[in-house]
Amino acid sequence: MKDNIRDQAESFDLDSVRARLRESGFDGWLFYFFKNNDPLALSILKLTETHMFSRRWFYLVRAEGEPVKLVHSIEADALSSLPGERVIYVGWRDMEEKLQQILSPGIKKLAMQYSPKNAIPYIARVDAGTVELVRDAGAEVCSSHDLVQHFEATWSRAQLESHIYATDKLRSIVDDAFAEVKRRLTKGEATTEYDIQRFILDKFDQYKLTTYSPPIVAINENSGNPHYQPTETVHKPIKEGDFLLIDLWAKRSDMKGSVYGDITWTGFVGDAVPQKYVEIFEIVRDARNAALDYVKEAVGQGKQIFGWQVDDVARNFIESKGYGKYFVHRTGHSIGEEVHGNGANIDNLETRDERALLPNTGFSIEPGVYLPEFGVRSEIDVYIDENSVTVAGQPIQESIIPILK
């Protein structure tokens, strides 16, 4: 989601939302907030987390006509930064009656942060009871998932440049980390997963990068755990003959609204990579490339595609090689101001993501095969616009790095 700490000059863009509602065929978009249920609403409406929101509020944006704010009497100014008519309620009966009144004139097809059967849980922010109230008012409740994508997941030119900067620096840091492992071991210095994680974080500082959590540095069986992370007390030494996976993500620390880069590389601590690692890596690499080629072909043809379809391409390839049961996560995720963004994920495993891959959005492609003794993941970041595809952090990995060569 986009950062919630904003300049006072930044305000809610009502005209853009109205235009998007008309294009999408919605009569309105209803935002509902209580007890931090919907950070997407805060972000899209440009509301800061410093507001006191202890009571329920609704904000209705109509495709045509003035917006309406439904707020409690003790927080009558809760939505004062937003345009529109203010309607004040006191008790629950009053709230339900007034909600029905503001929805009754012409609001038939209504977008909310709702996902049928919770198919896309990242969007499903409104509770079932509130959806029932809205339906009782006569409105058809539809998912706002593509509206959210448009306002939360699309990048500006400056954000694309920030992503390219971050990803290119991450790519350089991967080389530095492998070189540091080689330097330490050839000099007889002991080193650990945690040491190399700290080395990478120091590089982040050098390049003015920031991250919400430290990178993954994992050897051997630890690399078979997709979200393993070394800590100061739980880590393993890195030694000759080990298989090493590094997954790192960061964004510029010196730019408001900067976008993450997120890549994963693998190496072998030796001068020649054993065939057992090569075999699995090549399966993962080819699945990654098949998914990327599918995206490139679709964008080149102006064809709309969906997150689940790209997942199927990578997953079907790995399954065809007999390793489908070892590919235990989605193929990729949306990328934005948070590393796991609010756009379409490349997923037909954990969820069936039926959101379209929109122009000016970015996502990872990161298939993996995780065996008991080691795991391989190869991750790249993909940005698409109306007619082209950009993959930052070149060159992408095509073979396992022999670290001691």
Image: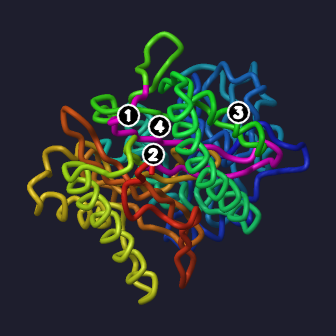
Q: Cβ–Cβ below 8 Å for labels 1 and 2?
A: yes
Q: Cβ–Cβ below 8 Å for labels 4 and 3?
A: no
Q: Identify which amino acid the numbered label 3 is placed on.
A: Asp
Q: Identify which amino acid the numbered label 2 is placed on.
A: Leu
Instruction: Decide which of tag 1 and tag 2 comes sooner along the chain.
Output: 1
Q: Identify which amino acid the numbered label 4 is placed on.
A: Arg
Quarter assignment of residue 354: bottom left
Residue 81 in the image, given as x and y percentages of width and height: 83, 42
* Image vertical order of residue 6 relative to residue 359, above or below: above
Q: Which mark is residue 5?
A: none
Query: Circle 1: is it few (<14), some (14-19), or many (20+) Cα within 10 Å?
Result: some
The residue segment tinted magenta is 238-265
Between the residue at mark 4 and the residue at mark 3, the CA separation in whole angstroms equals 37 Å
Q: Which residue position is annotated with label 4?
A: 125
Label 3: which secondary element: helix
Q: Which mark is residue 240?
A: 1
Q: Residue at x 55, y 54 (%)?
A: 148
* Image vertical order of residue 190 relative to residue 366, above or below: above
Task: Left or right? Give the position of 176 relative to 278.
Answer: right
Q: Which residue position is annotated with label 3?
A: 202
> Closer to the observer: label 1 or label 4?
1
Instruction: Decide which of tag 4 and tag 3 comes sooner along the chain.
Output: 4
Label 4: which secondary element: loop
Query: Circle 4: is it few (<14), some (14-19), or many (20+) Cα within 10 Å?
Result: many
- Looking at this view, is 380 or 388 the one in front? 380
Between the residue at mark 2 and the residue at mark 3, the CA separation in whole angstroms equals 23 Å
> Closer to the observer: label 2 or label 4?
2
